[in-house]
Image: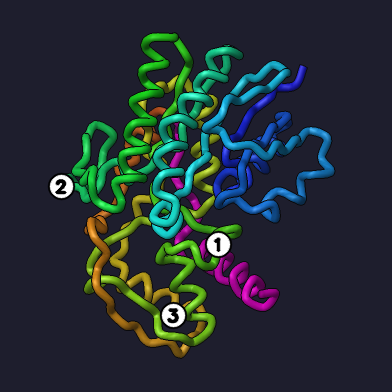
């Protein structure tokens, strides 16, 4: 009998790559997405696959799946600053009500539940690099709080279902990820830098560019998620690439790789923008035998070509 996985937010950037991975591994996949920020183009290549089903549905409402379910993978949520600042209420609702409904489905079906959490639960961290036992430094009433606190609540709800209802849980704390299917205008630095550089426009760096990020290529990230899903680890695990770089140096790297004539311009740093971001992946290495394999330059070259084609078709 087939193994059945429900992926909420399955038409999004990460969710669609996860659907691909699960199909490739022989799963039957039920993808649920209300297409608020997900795109049908991300999954239309799967529509003719008999092991794939798409349901347009808002997971903050009751989720009904008539068949058995073995895994519930909760990836539904606006995830870029542009999205969660544009949809603050929906972000809070999908982190709270959506997580509750997805956990309810896992409980009903006796399925394993995996939450796509985020490095943003660490806020603007006072500890570097960030380990899973760090509780974070988050402003709950700032503009970013709608996403940070939604995910922190989602983690608390997940652990409550684990402790009180005995649901088997997994929590992936996902750090900055990039690759094909990112949207050109989602408000994140990487697609903004690439699209600006490809158009030979000024590349916009917020602040003085000294803030750091650590970028993980999407295939590495999904491999880590898959290994976590199959593990027995019920508490949070950082999934990301620890190769840290300043935003200014990253902008220069994108300009170099695109052979662009762009120059860097500096603008005011957004409120509560984290100054440092680097995962400690010791736990992932030990528990999952996972670490990223794709170098940033290798991943960027693939992503740049994807965006180049996107700009041509646009």
* Lower position in the chain sequence, tag 1 or tag 2: 2
Number of the front mark, 1 or 3: 1
* Residue highlighted by disc 3: 255
- The residue labelled by disc 1 is 183
Tell me the residue that label 2 is attached to.
126
Query: Label 1 to label 2, Cα distance in Å?
Result: 31 Å
Left or right: 126 as drawn, with respect to 49: left
Verify CB contact (< 8 Å) between mark 1 and mark 3.
no
Q: Quadrant of the N terminus?
A: top right
Q: Residue 58, how many percent across, how many down?
A: 58, 37
Q: Main secondary structure of the magenta part?
A: helix
Which region of the structure is painted magenta? 288-314
For the residues labelled 2 and 3, say whether their Cβ atoms are less than 8 Å apart.
no
| Quarter residue 111 falls in | top right
Q: Residue furthest left?
A: 126
Looking at the rendered structure, the secondary structure element under dot 3 is helix
């Amino acid at each position: 009998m087939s193994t059945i996985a429900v992926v909420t937010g399955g038409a999004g950037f990460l969710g669609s790559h996860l659907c691909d991975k699960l199909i490739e591994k022989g799963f039957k996949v039920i993808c649920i997405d209300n297409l608020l920020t997900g795109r049908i183009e991300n999954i239309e290549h799967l529509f003719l696959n008999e092991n794939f089903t798409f349901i347009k549905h808002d997971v903050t409402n009751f989720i009904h799946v008539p068949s058995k379910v073995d895994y519930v993978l909760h990836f539904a949520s606006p995830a870029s600053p542009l999205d969660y600042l544009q949809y603050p209420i929906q972000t809070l609702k999908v982190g709270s009500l959506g997580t509750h409904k997805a956990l309810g489905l896992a409980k009903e079906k006796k399925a394993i539940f995996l939450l796509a959490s985020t490095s943003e639960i660490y806020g603007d961290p006072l500890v570097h690099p960030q380990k899973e036992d760090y509780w974070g430094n988050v402003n709950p009433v700032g503009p970013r709080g709608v996403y940070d606190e939604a995910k922190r609540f989602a983690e608390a709800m997940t652990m409550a279902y684990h402790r009180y209802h005995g649901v088997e849980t997994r929590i992936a704390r996902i750090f900055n990820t990039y690759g094909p299917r990112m949207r050109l205008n989602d408000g994140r630095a990487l697609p903004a830098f690439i699209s600006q550089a490809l158009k030979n426009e000024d590349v916009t760096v917020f602040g003085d560019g000294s803030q750091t990020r650590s970028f993980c290529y999407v295939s590495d990230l999904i491999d880590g998620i898959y290994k976590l899903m199959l593990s027995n680890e019920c508490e949070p695990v950082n999934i990301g690439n620890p190769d840290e770089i300043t935003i200014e140096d990253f902008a220069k790297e994108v300009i170099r790789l695109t052979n662009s004539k762009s120059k860097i311009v500096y603008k005011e740093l957004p409120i509560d923008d984290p100054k440092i971001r680097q995962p400690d992946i010791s736990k992932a290495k030990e528990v999952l035998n996972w670490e990223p394999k794709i170098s940033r330059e290798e991943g960027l070259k693939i992503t740049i070509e994807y965006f180049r084609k996107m700009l041509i078709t646009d």
